[in-house]
Image (spheres, rainbow, N blue to C red):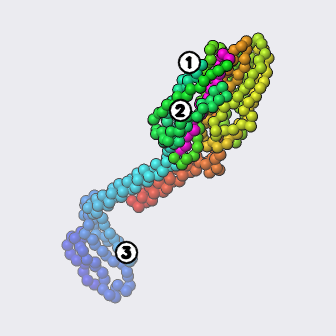
Amino acid sequence: MKQQPQGDPASWDEVSRKDAKAQRKTTAHWEYKKCSSLSGEPMKALGTPVTASWVSCVSKDDIRSIEVRNLELKKIMKKKILVMVGVFFPIVFFLMNLTAMAGFLKIETRTSVQVDHDVLKAHVTITNNGSDSAFNLQVHLKALNRLQDGLIKPQLDPGMSDSFLFEMPLSDVTKGRYPLTVLVDFHDANQYPFSALSGMGFYVGEDANPNLIVKVDPVSMKKKQDLVFHLKNLGTNPLQAEATLALPKELSSKKQENRFQIGPRSEKTLNFQISNFSALAGASYPVYCFFEYESEGVHHTAIASSMVTILKEESWFRRFRWMWVSLAVLLGLVFVGMLVKGRKKGFA
């Protein structure tokens, strides 16, 4: 049998073994490796017989290189997570606020009226307070059951205004207060028609406050809904009155006039059913109703206004969109957690 090498076992770089005959009887190997322990001290020769195995040692430099690699992998993983979060959550926010990003049209009117030498003069200013341009605008003024049409303005850009002057001769008109409406027709860039309605009163000769007061609640509707007006006669005499409903072109009613009587110091309820003719979901439209009567040679007008909002007919998916968004966020968090867990296993 050969002798084992002499010298410091920590410097041995060879394997001692028995001769061929002894090797057939045993599979034990003596392996000596020059290495350093984790504490930096030289490791002793491995004197334990092993069978078909290798004994490996890791140096300090190897440990440092592994730690550096792990730190680099952690940084890469954090960057990927930040990229995922930076992409995922803006997409969710965009989906939640998609409808709010669309442009809108909003035409507002300001009307001043005066009667001068039996001539009604109305100065109407229209302003585009929306985010998109309006096209083919036309102002229609109605007073004393007469209608006047203004010239068509081809385009009105956001933030811009334009003015129109109307003159209407008056003759044989009883003194008192009368209703006046201004209706503006306009279109969007796709030539879809819209209208904006406003109502007010003006007086001829002598102004007078009515004894009739009216209240009406805002209305939300899809196809049809009743406008309910609550009236009170504050006077001591019965009133023979007429109610006239003024609507934008997007809404309609089979009956827009109603003659009625209300007793002294009494209350009454009056209904008008309105229908959605071409109104868009989510839009709001002002409507007006004028209550006129004559008392002691003076014409009186009470004005009631309400806001009609068109409800959206949401699909099943849109009705539960918050649930879908929450589920998407949850799946995203689960995916990020799985990625973090997988990276940790890779580091181990």
- Give the spatial CA distance, label 1 vs label 2: 26 Å
Disc 2 marks a residue whose amino acid type is Glu
Q: Which numbered disc, 1 or 2, marks the residue that appears first in the sequence?
A: 2
Q: Which three-letter amino acid code belongs to the residue tagged 3?
A: Ser
Separation of residues labelled 3 and 1 (CA atoms): 115 Å
- Percent from the top left, x then y, of residue 288? 65, 29
**Which quarter of the figure is the N terminus placed in?**
bottom left
Provide the residue designation for mark 2.
108
Q: Regarding mark 3 in the picture, which secondary structure is present there?
A: loop
Q: Describe the element under mark 2 as helix, strand or loop.
A: strand
Q: CA distance from mark 3 to mark 2?
A: 89 Å
Looking at the picture, how far across and down is residue 213, in whole percent? 69, 19
- Give how far across and how far down residue 62 sits, in percent: 28, 63
**Viewer-nearest residue: 46 or 69:** 69
Main secondary structure along the magenta-highlighted residues: strand
Q: Residue at x 47, y 33 (%)?
A: 161
> Residue 199 or 216: which is nearer the viewer?
199
Q: Is residue 200 above or below residue 46?
A: above
Sequence-wise, the earlier of marks 3 and 2 is 3
Quarter of the image where one finds residue 347: bottom left
Magenta residue span: 174-188
Who's the residue at 66% across and 38% down the image?
251
Does residue 306 appear anywhere in the picture?
no
Q: Which residue is mark 1?
A: 116
Residue in front for this viewpoint, 100 or 29: 100
Magenta span includes 175: yes
